[in-house]
Image (tube, rainbow, N blue to C red):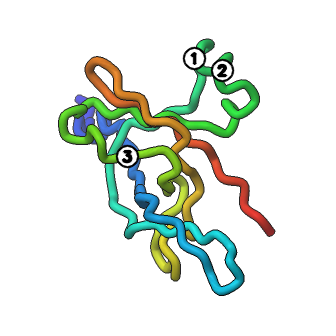
Amino acid sequence: MYNINRQNVFNYKSTLYIAKKLKTTQDENLNQVENYDTPKKYRFNVQAVNEDSEIREFGELANRMKVALITEKSKYIGKFYDFDKAYLETTPEGEIKNGANADYRIYSVRNQNTCIRIYLLKLVKED
């Protein structure tokens, strides 16, 4: 009666690119320059931070945060670290320097019993 594509109905994962933070270097004026690896594409369940405990923990930052839930813990453990950059609402296409187009950074990586929770903080773009 209804033609429902079950694959699309249960496709709750978002496309997310993550660029691993590399060693910080200095430019000719002795300014710190953050370097990032080439972003890699992933598919994770990404949601807004909305649990009471998370809102109490992060305070006002909770409004700028998302959380990625990774259920395949053994496959991804140790792959992501704080300060890696993430592309959730944008892509790395056309960027000259890795990490330039990123709209989030990894705020915290938490290994739990059966999954990994990655808290992402929205970056504020400088004009």
- At a point 50% along the width and 36% down the height, the residue shown is 108
Q: Amino acid at mark 1?
A: Glu
Please state the horizontal and vertical placement of residue 6, each as a whole percent of the image: 23, 35
Mark 3 or mark 1: which is in front?
3
SS of the residue under disc 2: helix
User: Separation of disc 3 and disc 1 at Cα?
Assistant: 23 Å
Crowding near the residue tagged with mark 2, few <14, some 14–19, many ≥20 C-alpha atoms within 10 Å:
some
Side (left or right) of 115 relative to 87: left
Of the numbered discs 3 and 2, the one sitting upstream in the chain is 2
Asked if the residues shown at circle 3 and circle 1 are in contact, with their CB atoms under 8 angstroms apart, the answer is no
Q: Earlier in the sequence, mark 3 or mark 1?
A: 1
Image: 10 above or below 85: above
- Res 2 quadrant in image: top left
**What quarter of the picture does the N terminus occupy?**
top left
Is 124 drawn above or below residue 10 in the view shown? below
Instruction: List the residue tagged with mark 3.
Output: 80
- Residue position for label 2: 55
Tag 1 residue: 51
Question: From the viewer's perspective, is 59 left or right of 45?
Answer: right
Residue 5: percent from left, percent from top = 24, 39
Q: Residue furthest right?
A: 127
Residue 53 position within the rendered picture, expressed as x and y whole percent measured from the top left: 59, 13
In what quadrant of the picture does the C terminus appear? bottom right
Residue type (three-letter) at the residue carrying disc 3: Phe
Measure the alpha-carbon separation of dots 3 and 2: 23 Å
- Most distant residue in the left direction: 74
Q: Position of residue 8 (x, y in %)?
A: 29, 41
Residue at x 33% of width, y 58% of height: 41
Q: What element does badge 1 sit on?
A: loop
Residue drawn where x is 60% and y is 75% of the image? 26
